[in-house]
Image (cartoon, rainbow, N blue to C red):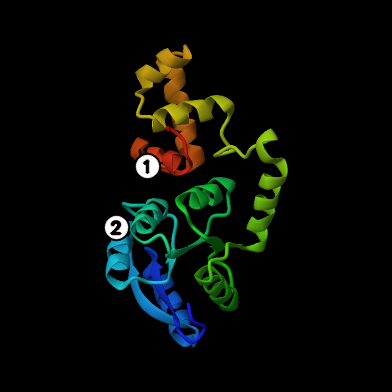
Amino acid sequence: MSTDTPIRVLVADDHPVFRTGLRTLVEESPLLEYAGEAADGEQAVAVCRQQRPDVVLMDIRMPGVSGIDATRRILADRPGTGVLMLTMLEDDTSVFAAMRAGARGYILKGADPDQITRAITAVAAGELIFGAALAAHMAAFFRNGSRDPVRAFPGLSTREHDILNLIAAGQSNTAIAERLALSEKTIRNNVSSIFAKLQVTDRATAIVRARDAGLGT
């Protein structure tokens, strides 16, 4: 991309006030050009096909199609698009799910405007970029490597993690109980604990989060 050509930016976030703030940031920068907005993942995919932005500022948690799934679909259509995850979350699971989906960057919503602008320009140039706190997670992961890999949802116990993996694979509580040689009551109690720790209210949402993190495959 020529340095004289503004970077076309699409904003995908389900919070109208936050979208407005990002639009203002983009429109006030001489380096950037506003290419549209989306309120959910499905809309982000559709607007990307129409507007062909250089960079997408993508929220991870959105209703319906998540930012992770939207990223996969956008990059399947246009692999050269730079996706920058902008989110309130900084857990390992979200970071690695974003990377697996093909995102080039991941910064927190608390970042100041200059940091966001620098991240957009870096991603547009093909670089990978992470905020300072997230860079520490990345360094630890690559330092440990396969000897001590980062497990998705480290707040879950080993049993809960195994049960979530089976839930993500589409197994019922009865099937999971048989597979793990546990009672259905024990599985139900563990499922309730998993929902609480993941801060979800139903099985479908838990499956989406688990699959985003690479479970159930």
In the picture, the disc for residue 57 is: none
Q: Quadrant of residue 80?
A: bottom left
Q: Position of residue 29 (x, y in %)?
A: 49, 85
Q: Earlier in the sequence, mark 2 or mark 1?
A: 2
Q: Nearer the viewer, mark 2 or mark 1?
A: 2
In the picture, the disc for residue 42 is: 2
* 67 to the left or right of 126: left
Q: Secondary structure at mark 1?
A: helix
Q: Position of residue 38 (x, y in %)?
A: 33, 67
Please rate how many residues cluster around mark 2, counting C-alpha atoms within 10 Å: few if below 14, some from 14 to 19, many from 20: some
Residue at image coords 50%, 71%: 124
Residue farthest right in this picture? 143
Q: Position of residue 46 (x, y in %)?
A: 27, 63
Please rate how many residues cluster around mark 1, counting C-alpha atoms within 10 Å: few if below 14, some from 14 to 19, many from 20: some
Q: Which residue is mark 1?
A: 205
In the depicted structure, whether residue 16 falls above or below residue 72: below
Q: Quadrant of residue 34?
A: bottom left
Residue at image coords 62%, 63%: 131
Q: Secondary structure at mark 2?
A: helix
Amino acid type of the residue tagged 1 in the rendering: Thr
In the depicted structure, whether residue 174 falls above or below residue 121: above
Q: Quadrant of residue 116?
A: bottom right
In the depicted structure, whether residue 50 falls above or below residue 137: below
Q: Position of residue 109 (x, y in %)?
A: 53, 66
Q: Nearer the viewer, residue 185 or 102?
A: 102
Looking at the image, can residue 24 be seen?
no
In the depicted structure, whether residue 69 falls above or below residue 17: above
Q: Nearer the viewer, residue 211 or 78?
A: 78
Task: Classify the position of the C terminus by image quarter.
Answer: top left
